[in-house]
Structure formats: structure tokens, C-alpha cells
Amino acid sequence: MLATRIATALVVVPLAVLGMLYLPTFAITLVFSVLMLLGAWEWAGLLRLRDTGHVAMVLATAALIFVFALIRSQWWLVAVDNLLIGAACIWWLIAIGWIVRYPNGWAAVMGRIDVGVATGLLTLVAAVAAVTYLHQSDQGALLLLAFFFLIWAADTGAYIAGRTLGRHKLAPAVSPGKTREGAIGGIVAAMVFAGAGAWVLGYGGERLVGFVVLGAWVAIISIVGDLTISMFKRHAGIKDSGTLFPGHGGVLDRLDSVLAAAPWFVAGLHWLPSTL
């Protein structure tokens, strides 16, 4: 299993890096939108919908992605796009409360199909909006690359620290394998990479410090994304959301951290000190 995971990563990561550096924003949006449509199919599985429900979830996600892509180019509707990203940020804060109390109340609220569908649509569409925003901004390719390296650093740091030092469970009711030591390792790794990323981006002074703090928050909220998808999977009684990536599972298994962290990374960039 580990060999399969490594082999998949060796193929996917270089392709992702090259794509972020050299593809235009339209292509980045298109590729990520396709991934989110696959994620929508998997989300329908988490809600245990029938085949028609799977198709409806994908079509609804596609329609919303198209609508927001259409209005993104209209200056008088830019606030709508920001509202979508802001709403996603709020949802991921609410998700922390569900992680703490799980499984209490989950079936009665988040386990409802209407709530689950609404959450999925917000999560998937906002992620596309956030990735698009990052890539089309100043230093867009580098910013998007820095974001994904923060996610990968946090994931790798958490894995290494958890395997070597993990003793205390982080959220045993949700994901028994995750530890507090692993979470701390992921946060530290993300902060180190944030410092390196700030240097590449030409940040210094207060902005560099702010970017490192943002890196820590990205790591924290990425864990929230991971645990939230784990709650949906546990409620559905499945181990993986899909099988797209050999050894890694489905789109939601691999991009759960991105779903939560992308909107918050965009929001955090707005709050960075202007001093370089």
C-alpha cells in the first residue's frame, strides 16, 4: 500500500506543479472543476444517494461552478464570489464544533440529505472559486504553488510526527489514527514551508511573519477538512470516498484538506500586513 501511495504521488505531484506554473488560469479552473465534479459524485455517495442523486449532485455542482465563473468577470458581481468564499470559511469554523461533539447530533442535522447536499455544494464550488482567485492574482502561479506546498508539508509533517511521536489521540471518535503530536508536526512543517514560501514570494518583515502565521492556520484548518470528510465517511460506513488515486482513495480523500484550506488561504492573504 505504501509503495502504491508513493508511486501515485511521484506521478501526480510533478504534473500538478508543472500545471500550476505553466497552464493559464482558465485551464487551472477547468482541471480543478473536473476534480470537484468527481468529488460531487463521491459526496453523493457519502450521503448514500441513489444513482439519480449522484447525477443530480454533479449537475448542480457544474451549474453553480458555471454561474460563478460567468459572474466572476463582471466587476459589479465580484462581491458575490467573495461572499461564496467567505461563507465557506464560516462553514469550516462550524465544522470544528461538529468534530468536537461527533457523533452527538450528527444524524439529526448533518446526516440529513438536504443539509449534506447544501454543505457539499458550498464546499466544492467555493474551492474552485478560491483556486481560481489565487491563480489569477498577482504572483498567481507562485501563490497557488505555495498554497499546495503548505498542504503537502502539513500532511507530510503530520504523518512523520504521528508515526514517530504519536501518543495522544486528536479526535478518536472521528479518526482514531490521528494524534495531537501529528497535528503539531504538521503545523510546524507548514510554518517552515511558509517561511520559505515567503522568501520566494519576496515577502519580508511583518508580511513574512504574517505569512508564517497563515501557514500555521492553513495546517490547522486542513486538519479540520480531513476530519470533516472523515465524519461524513464514518456516517456513511465507508473507508474511502472513491478509488481514483491508487493507494490514496478518491478525490475527497486526497483533497479534503484543500477544500477547507483554500478559502481560508484566500481570506488570510487579504489580512496580511502590507509591509514587505
Image (cartoon, rainbow, N blue to C red):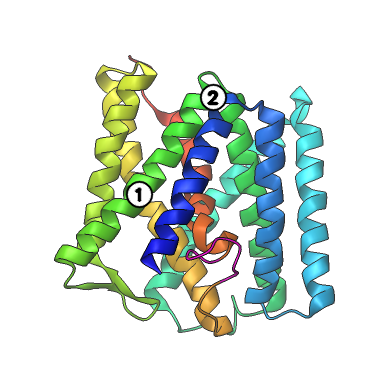
Few, some or many residues within 10 Å of mark 1 (<14, 14–19, 20+): many
Residue at horizontal 61 percent and vertical 32 percent from the top:
133
First to last magenta residue range: 241-249
Amino acid type, mark 1? Ala
Magenta highlight on residue 87: no
Q: How many marks?
A: 2
Label 1, on which residue? Answer: 219
Question: Which residue is denoted by mark 2 in the rendering?
Answer: 140
Q: Amino acid at mark 2?
A: Gly
Instruction: Work out whether 119 lies above or below 202.
Output: below
Earlier in the chain: of badge 2 and badge 1, it is 2
Q: Position of residue 149 (x, y in %)?
A: 40, 39
Could you tell me residue 92's position as x and y percent?
Answer: 49, 57
Q: With respect to residue 128, does 50 lie above or below?
A: below
Find numbered disc 1 in the image and state the secondary structure of the residue it sits on.
Answer: helix
Quarter of the image where the N terminus is located? bottom left
Residue 273 shown left or right of residue 72 in the figure:
left
- Dot 2 falls on a residue whose secondary structure is helix
1 relative position to 239: left or right: left
In terms of secondary structure, what is the magenta stretch mainly?
loop
Calculate the distance from the C-alpha at mark 2 to the C-alpha at mark 1: 20 Å
The part of the image, by quadrant, that contains residue 176 is bottom left
Residue 111 visible here = yes
Q: 46 or 251, which lies in front?
A: 251
* Residue 218 visible here: no
Vertical comparison of 118 with 111: above or below: above
Which residue is at a point 48% across and 55% down the rendered structure image?
8
